[in-house]
Amino acid sequence: MQTNLPLNTIAIVGNGLHAWTIAACLARKLQKAPTDIVVITDPNAVPDSIGESTLPAINYFHRILGLNERQLVAVTKGTYKLATEYTPIDTAYQNDKHLARNSFFHAMSPYGAAFDNIAFQHHVTKAHLAGVAIDLNRFSLPAMAAQQGKFGIPSCDELDVPFSYALHVDTKRYAAGMQDFAYKLGVKHVEGSITATQLSYPNIEEDTSQFIQSITINKNQTFSADLFIDCSADGRLIHQALGINYQHFDTLLPCDHSVQFSTQRPHDPRATTQIKPHSAGYWRSFPLQDRGVCEYHYSGDYLTHEKVLGILNLGKEESKSATHQQHKPRQINTFWSANCVAMGSAAGELGRNAVSNFHLVQSAVLRLVDLLPDNTLNRNAECPSRDEYNHLCEEEYARILDYHCAYFALLAKHDSLSNLPFWQQQQSTEWPDSLTHKMTLFKHTGRLPFYERETFSEKTWLSLFLGLGLWPMQYDRLLDVGQRSINDSLVACEKFGASIQRMCSDMPSHYMFLQRYCGAK
Amino acid sequence: MQDNSIKSIVIVGGGTAGWMTAAALANLLKDTKITLIESDQIGTVGVGEATLPHLRFFIQRLGIDEHAFMRATNATYKMGIEFINWGEIGDAYIHPFGDFGHPIKGIDFHHYYVKLHQQGLNKPIGQYSLPVMASKAKKFAYPSTDEKSILSTYSYAFHMDAGLFSNFLRDYSETRGVTRFEGMVTRVNQCNESGFIKSVTLNDETEFDADFFIDCSGFKGLLIEQCLKTGYDDWRHWLPCDRAIAIPTQATSAPLPYTKATARNAGWQWRIPLQNRVGNGHIYSSPYMNDDTALETLLANIDGKPISEPNFLRFTTGKRKKAWSKNCVAIGLSAGFLEPLESTSIHLIQLGIMKLLDFFPDRNCDEIRVNEYNRMMQLEFERLRDFLVLHYHATQRSDSAFWNYVRTMPLPAGLDHKIKLFKERGRVVQYSEGLFLKASWLAVYFGQGIIPTHYDWQLDTIPTEHIVKQLDDIESDINSAVHQMPSHADSIAQHCALAKSWRTPPPRASFSLYGG
Ligand SMILES: Cc1cc2nc3c(=O)[nH]c(=O)nc-3n(C[C@H](O)[C@H](O)[C@H](O)COP(=O)(O)OP(=O)(O)OC[C@H]3O[C@@H](n4cnc5c(N)ncnc54)[C@H](O)[C@@H]3O)c2cc1C
């Protein structure tokens, strides 16, 4: 029998949004444990993003922290996100109403329902193959609401169709809120640049990996901790001190530069994050209450910074807010090594077209809490919790990598892009086997293979494929049994679409909702 | 467009696998010609008598009345399996179809249990499981549909006469258009170019051709192996039992609502109660025990009078390398056989059928579809295998060469990590797909003496008195619920009564081991 030895100190090395989100969550979960949490921030760090577009998992995260969502949206001048709006056109990036007609609104919950025990996609595929045009947006409540500029949270008992939503938040305000929250929970804060790290071998017998004994800040202050969380931009501890390397995804994730800037306050913002391809990458934009956030992601091989500035042609205010960043699409080889866990940028970068590091940080910190060892185990060379943590992260990253690649893989097939050199390049990319298997199986059977640890459910993958134009060549054979006709399928779909339309008509506009409940003026 | 759809299917084999497949296909593929060929000379294995809750889902999907099924197969209820002498001689625990306790403050119940255990609590974790306590009290009632009730925390399956089940499904299938032929398949004819199966020929030279073939011919895999030569992964180094003797006996007491699996010197013995008799069998490993000793052991440990001669069986634990090859899917023993220890075979038949329907092909049987089917079945077999291996490996027994071997054998990759992770801090490796989930792993770990060194340290902030009270409350809730349940025998009598007005309809089935 052994009693638990709690960790005495956890040090978080990093800045802004990620560091304070991690700190707040740990502090909340370890509220009653005798563990000190210290955040060490670097005054010279690169600034945060302007805004973040999140996934529905953030609602769970907030529940765990005990935060009131509407208040949080008000304080962070946030807005809601019902769907990702995939727009096929290259030109404008403002929330332009008439562009929406061609958009696919990708909600994060299933489309349609099983009719006659046969999954939705087979019914629409059957119709599609017969030449019937299918507007997917009509078969998802959040997608349709998003398209119509609406937002509401249906109460559970009136809701018999899938519904989910996420948030757009102002990074600075959100980080400040988390910092505040963390302070209240007793988190300590130290400012200073790390100038040295001291390593040691905790177990002399074996050839164990090195542990971080302590770190030196500003050349004179030394901090030791039982566990270090590295969420610095450059992997200050995990990579630079412990020497863990990254694997690179340059060929899979082609956008290695981005410009983020804020735009004018949208008048009647849709509850969506917009994604739009351009000649050498993609636009991503979403609304906050007091401004819009716009990101221009591109490949440095195809565009120079000057050229991009020319394309963007930013106004004075926009220029002031603009930040230019270089990205290294990559992933750390060991997420948790010895007594150091890498999160956020230190763990890697997989781009931002669907999942940002902000989501990965939330997911990582919850996983860490779940697997947090006690202090004796933490010092052991062999630590099954650590192995498990690493294994889970690897699977999670692999599935997200697939998802991000899918965007490029599918768009490269569109006629309107296929003659652009950047997109041509994507056509010849060798995608991960798991993604190829997914796309091929779907194309041939209308089904998705099963993989563990998906961030996006099978149904979300499925609607992404359909929405971006990957249609199966075959539908479920059982759909043809017993003289079922296309018309049967269409009638069932129609009925479902009509009920969605009814629910939608009761919803207020997104802006009205924000005004009423979330402090928008 | 060319019509490539499958118009005809031949199923070779009329055991549990053959008839379950025929029934499911007949129910869904209304315009496909389905033929089943079986040979009276060869007969069936048919010892599959203990099932899992998923079978209810199968029965309900076929629109079969559960009570009619029970009457037809002499079925009794099953809420779990009691494992005797596994961790150590003298040990016993039940692996139930349900959870232990419930999470408190977001932390899994077993951490609380471990904490009190460390402080001297010496109750088995089964005290906190309704199906375990109900099993011990020989009681049974349908799970409640009220999620808040403790009576909703379990699920149930059946013990049944597999031969009668096949007959029952034969009736069902024949009413729905399946044609049955009696005869021995002596030749399997392939298409020269593609290697696809064209037809099978019987000993009287009748030839049956079809677009698609399902091999339910048992261990030998007449189509999938003898013709298509897909190969077999032999797993005897992990699951060394390879022989069985089965013998039914007269019932001497009211049926128990659970299966018994009693470990012996070189294997284990099953006891499966039906309404009218008891199924018994001894599974053993031939390098460690000969047939005579095995039979002696079995006969010395049965409680009623045998009602037939002992039936000797041989098998190789493992799995067919590809369950689906070209235009032929193997379902049942032809696809592989693990070990009847957790009654998984019929479940694997069901899963094979479901996945086949899910990936139902056209005549081309495109490879991508076939590969995914095989990948899924492989994953399922491997996860089941690991769970079964755990039963053998997690032991302190050192009383025979057999137990010394399994206790010290090298484990399949991944299982070692699973055990270590649990020992370290009570963490069970989670999957979203798979048959045996957390509750089952917990049952075996705790039941066979693998107790975590550490519980979740978040508990240290909760006063011990609170934890004691919580556990006491759960225990007394369970006890009073069990007290009110009718006996197993009474429930069977009521549900199998002919008059419909007497019967309560069974709850909706779900595709899960634990209900809810
Ligand atoms: C010892 C033991 C205990 C078991 N216990 C359980 C349990 O508790 N629970 C559980 O779920 N499962 C259990 N099983 C597994 C279960 O018995 C089988 O999964 C089930 O019987 C299915 O068998 P099958 O239909 O695949 O093959 P079989 O029963 O072997 O049927 C084969 C069929 O193929 C036909 N056939 C073969 N060759 C030819 C030919 N040349 N021409 C024509 N027809 C042919 C035969 O006539 C027969 O109809 C157990 C198995 C064993 C060995």
Image (cartoon, coloured by chain):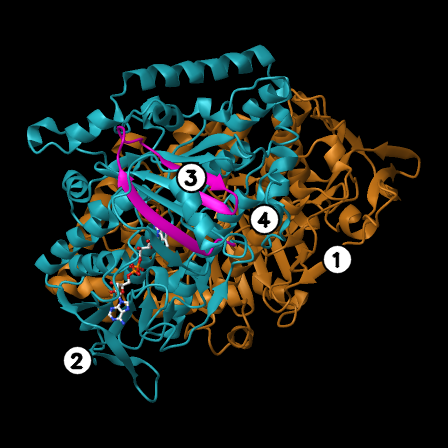
Q: Would you name the residue on which mark 3 appears?
A: B261
Q: Is residue B365 left or right of residue B400?
A: left
| Residue A18 drawn at (x, y percent) | 65, 40
In the rendered image, residue B258 lying in the magenta stretch gets the answer yes
Disc 1 is placed on an element classified as loop
> Which residue sits at x=62%, y=51%?
B409
Q: Residues within 10 Å of mark 4 (few under 14, many from 20)?
A: many
User: Residue B307's mark?
Assistant: none
Q: CA distance from mark 2 to mark 3?
A: 44 Å
| Residue A395 drawn at (x, y percent) | 57, 53
Tell me what hue chain A is rendered in: orange
Q: Would you name the residue on which mark 2 appears?
A: B204
* Same chain for the residues under marks 2 and 1 in the image: no
| Residue B246 drawn at (x, y percent) | 34, 49
Q: Chain of mark 4?
A: B
User: Residue B406's mark?
Assistant: 4
Q: Quadrant of the N terminus of chain B?
A: bottom left
Quarter holding residue A314: bottom right
> Which residue sits at x=31%, y=74%?
B327
Disc 4 is placed on an element classified as helix
Label located before the other in sequence (4 or 2):
2
